Image (cartoon, rainbow, N blue to C red):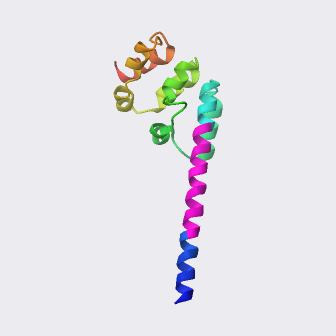
Amino acid sequence: MKLSTLLFTLSVSSVALLSSHTVNANEQLAASICDYVGADDKNRIRKKLKESRVKLRNVYAGISCGGNNLIRHAIVNGADGAGEYIVKQIPKSDLAAGGDVAWADANGHSGSAVIAALKDRAGL
């Protein structure tokens, strides 16, 4: 009986350790992408996504940079190249439903090249 309890405890501990490692990796990926977007370095964004074996469209909704999504973060930092790259990688339906155009209008960023690319791609 004690052996089964020990095995159960070890298996739960193993799962907990693996889960925390995954969370740390996801947080590190998000932090790196935020840094690269802020620096307008789309080549490093591509490289980081490729190294992590993820597609931007799959992680976009889960990344927040200082309370903003990636598109808004690019606009605030004047990162037009990275912002346009992000717009090209996100499905049109997500772009249309994101509310980024209204946010840009309300915050004085309506002239941004990223917003122009977003409007063009989403058909707004």
Asked if residue 54 is among those painted magenta in the image, a careful observer would answer: no
Q: Is residue 123 above or below residue 23?
A: above
Q: Position of residue 42 (x, y in %)?
A: 61, 28
Task: Give 34 or 42, whichever is nearer the viewer.
Answer: 34
Secondary structure, magenta segment, majority class: helix
First to last magenta residue range:
13-31
Look at the image and say whether residue 24 sits in the magenta stretch.
Answer: yes
Would residue 84 be found to the left or right of residue 120 on screen? right
Left or right: residue 86 versus residue 124 is right
Q: How many marks?
A: 0
Quadrant of residue 30 in the image?
Answer: top right
Q: Residue at x 58, y 56 (%)?
A: 20
Q: Nearer the viewer, residue 88 or 68?
A: 68
- Residue located at (57% from left, 47% from top): 26
Q: Which residue is located at x 57 percent, y 81 percent?
A: 6
Whole-percent x, y for residue 29 in the image: 60, 42
Most extreme residue toward the bottom is 1
Position of 98 relative to 52 (above/below)? above
The spot of residue 47 in percent (x, y) is 64, 38
Return the x and y of residue 69 as percentages of the image width and height.
48, 30
Q: Quadrant of the C terminus?
A: top left
Instruction: Name the side, left or right, on which 78 lies relative to 101.
Output: right
**Between residues 14 and 81, which one lies in front from this camera angle?**
14
Q: Is residue 11 above or below residue 21?
A: below
